[in-house]
Amino acid sequence: MSYSFSRTKMIEKIKFGLLSPDEIRKMSAARIITADTYDEDGLPIPSGLMDQRLGTIEPGQRCQTCGNLVSNCMGHFGHIELARPVIHVGYAKRVLKVLRSICPECSRLMLTDEEKEGFRKDQVKHRKMFFEGDEEVARLVFKRARKAKVCPYCGAKKKKIIIEKPTTFYEEEEAKGSRRITPIEILERLKKMNDNDLRILGISPENARLEWVIFTVLPIPPVCARPSITLDSGIRSEDDLTHKLVDVIRINQRLRENIDAGAPHLIVEDLWELLQYHITTYFDNQVSGIPPARHRSGRALRTLTQRLKGKEGRFRSNLSGKRVDFSARSVISPNPYISINEVGVPQDVAKILTIPTNVNDWNIEEMKQLVLNGPHIHPGANYIIRNDRRRIDLRYVKNRKMIADILAPGYTVERHLNRGDLVLFNRQPSLHRMSIMAHEVKIMDGKTFRLNLTVCPPYNADFDGDEMNLHVPQSEEARTEAELLLKVQEHILSPRFGGPILGGIQDFISSVFQFTSKDSLYNKKDTLKLLFLGEIFDSNPDFSLDDLKPVISDPEPIYSGKQIFSTLLPDDLNIRIKSKFCKKCEVCEEENCQYDAYVVIKNGELITGTIDENSFGAMQSNSILQRIIKDHGNARGREFLDNATRMLLYVIRQNGITMGLDEVYVKGSDYEVIRKILEEANNESEKLIKAFYDNDTKVLKRAPGRSMRETLELRIRQVLAEARKKAEETAAHYIGDEAHSVIMTKSGARGNILNLGQMSAVVGQQAIRGERINRGYSSRTLPHFKINDLSPKSRGFVESSYRNGLNPEEFFFHAMGGREGLVDTAVRTSTSGYMQRRLVNALQDMVIENDGTVRNSDKNIIQFNFGDDSVNPQMTDHGAAVNLDVLLLKAKSLHVDEIREELKKLPIETKSVVKEEKVKKKPAKEKKTPKVEEEEIDEASLMKSYEKETGKNAIWRGKTTKGYLDWKKEKMG
Amino acid sequence: MTKKRKIDVLLHELVPKHHLLTKEESQKLLEKFKISVIDLPQMSEKDPVAIAVGAKEGDIVKIIRDSHTTVKFVNYYRYITKEKV
């Protein structure tokens, strides 16, 4: 049915080399003489830089060389004959090396024949193994040849050659001083070199003789490589390359005229140098040692090297990082009601992105409907590709009904993106593989992409204006791969450590904390609502509310949050975890923990403990989610996460979490206590400072390995840190356990006690580079303080709390500390980004082969066994293949008696089953095999006897012959 | 001038066990992985350990060392390259 019209050809080899002057002339379509581009009428000047023989850029115009239109003409090179030879900057270094290692008179490599032979052998050996020359050997040759003083062949004395960057060479003789070697001379010397010498130097005489590096002819790139732009005002603006070429041609022209006119040597020399400058900047406008060529506006020109190099260069910007079709980008916003596997896509986007769908007998009606809907009604289609590969744009079709009717199997419909389609979703920077995951499309109103909140951590996304990209896989293979490997649920476990990177975040944690704490109780109505939201009745059809035993049954049945949460868990889940707010008592009371901080889940039932970040959060090891996935797979893990978050959302909506200024307002006696703590700390440091000045080693005991001054700093910091800690504790006590801010910190949803302490009690010491603030004016930080004041206040200790406000000095110190933090993050991201780039470039094409070895693209072995153990870290339990604690727990939770009962029954049953099977199987085999053999033998012997009797073949061309069959019939009846 | 004391690098606790493969063993290894010698990780002929085991260019040295991820011993094979000076 489908026939490919494309022709494929194998690339046998690619040859890299230099263009010889002859080759340049041969491939040239036009010799360029005039430095002008267009005449007054706007027509290209013949033999000018925009000569029409160099290809067209004007639509509708035919190329004078190939006769094609713009779309098919790939452009043609031209050339200029240079009046004097000029060196290519990029090869100046290589030219220098070669000049230094050859004889100035006879141009032979200054090595003895034996040495040459040795190096040649090395090169040949290397080429046999690696299919390329050995740079190491070439380096050695240069090193060796440079040492020679006298040419071993003609006896000429070698002279010292110096380069003046970038392209001027001098020859130095001790007696005569230095003399410039002109490119003409260099050309002469290089031309004289013999092929074998070049080979030893690692230069191929067939593909890249070094003298070709010195231009006598300069190729002119086609017009399409340097298109001119016509501005709105009608003014033509030429490309940077054209500008540069104009300079080159103009100077070349002047140089020629001067030479022809027999101008003084000095003038010719000057012009020659100018030509060299222009050609150098034409290749690379960032050569050190010469000023970059500039545009009239003062902007440096973007010449050949600049086009290729760096982030905005051809390679990184246009080849590695192409822009793609079938993609969309928009702001993201949250939606907790869609699954983690889904992404909300605006209808406007869905109407533009398409999926090519083949029409067949089974979907033809559906496709017809899509075509009828057309490009403007949502579940529609944008294009149809007929089976003769003609593409019909539905936007311009007047009668879609007609088109829908001609639809037949073999057609392809490019239909709109619709519910359930798989797309790739991505957020930059793409630092790990979880930065691109596959989601199922859900068409939604609005103009933003919608995202489940629990997938924020892997993307590192938030909703303060973040944008994300969406790509639509176009082939069946790509979609399958996305389904199997890229779906979000396949990435719940991180390949970094085998733990979940998805999980409850922020309010979900606060919510689950409140929900599963001891005093959370729900009546029948609320319970049913919660169970419904958790889709318990869908995922477990056998479930009924009667299965739950209410905690209180009088006057109405009351269920605990723990019970309701348990319904989400699989029946065989067994976990023991310490909560985040565990007080770390000396003797752990485990189940009987008075703070309810020991989570015990037995056979899928939360018995004690309050669920918090440790058991429900993202990036938490050994959490509920991880255990569910390890036992029941990714799909069940996804289901749990979806259902739990939906249930918890209702809980937090009922409870409500809020925080205001009054929550961190410490007043009354507790405030006095805090002030007192700070005062004491101040006095303490005062004492220490006094001891420092008095050199009193009893009060200020010198710390080992430190000076007195350092000891003082250390002690003061200690005293202040202690004070801050005490103040924080006092404040925490005052605020109590019920405050919403405390619930957030305790459950691990957001913030920590330190943040609360800074808000309510004291902000504490501001530091720069790990020290108290000690910069600013001479011997003091600010003019508000006396010289050499070492008191806490003058060195950046902020006594106020954020709630009470900072005084001006404190504010300034605080800003200093804050600035350091900002600078640090900025520096960290840029350095780690560069490191990442280097690492990725080095490792990107390594592959685990089928034999378990890790190899690079050359199939060199990097590692004999992936990770030394061939273990996929995503499948491990924090790096270990088995988690014994969990296994033990699982074993313990089994009902021993039941198992015994089962074991009693089991052996008899299994034995009998096995016996029966054996009995059944054996005779069957025995019966079957001999029968077949008998028949075969029979047939074979029959054939033999037939052949003997008649002398004809029984089997001819793989088929039994007619004669044999007749004979057989006759004989057997 | 003090004389350089000769140290047997192989006895140092940080030096993993090195084992020079025979011709047959090398051949077997190359066949096992279906590679040629140059596909192996490389080691200089002048490497102190290479000198100590007496490995020459083209030889293969088996290195047995403890891995961070496994309790088992792991083999690393190195192909010896000649230093060009």
Image: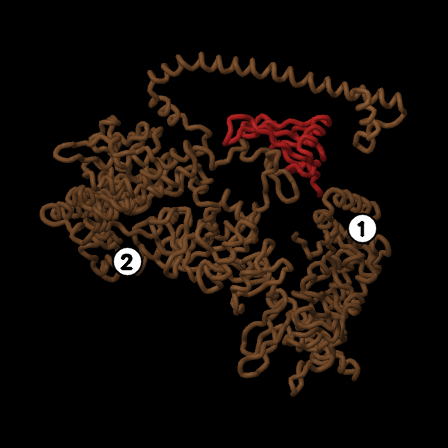
Q: Amino acid at mark 1?
A: Leu
| Chain B as rendered: colour | red
* Chain under numbered label 2: A
Please give the label number shown on residue A111: 1
Q: Left or right? Give the position of A744 relative to A640.
A: left
Q: Earlier in the sequence, mark 2 or mark 1?
A: 1
Q: Give x and y (percent) for residue A923.
A: 61, 14
Element type at marker 1?
loop
Is A18 in front, or is A858?
A858
Tell me the chain of label 1: A
Which quadrant holds the N terminus of chain B?
A: top right
Reply above or below: A698 against A676. Answer: above
Query: Do discs 2 and 1 belong to a common subunit?
Result: yes
Whole-number angstrom distance, CA of label 2 to CA of label 1: 69 Å
Residue type, numbered disc 2 = Thr
Give x and y (percent) for residue A109.
80, 54
Residue identified by numbered label 2: A781
Left or right? Give the position of A345 relative to A919.
Answer: left
Q: Residue at image x 23%, y 50%?
A: A758
Which residue corresponds to the image point at 54% horizontal and 74% vertical from the top-left? A299
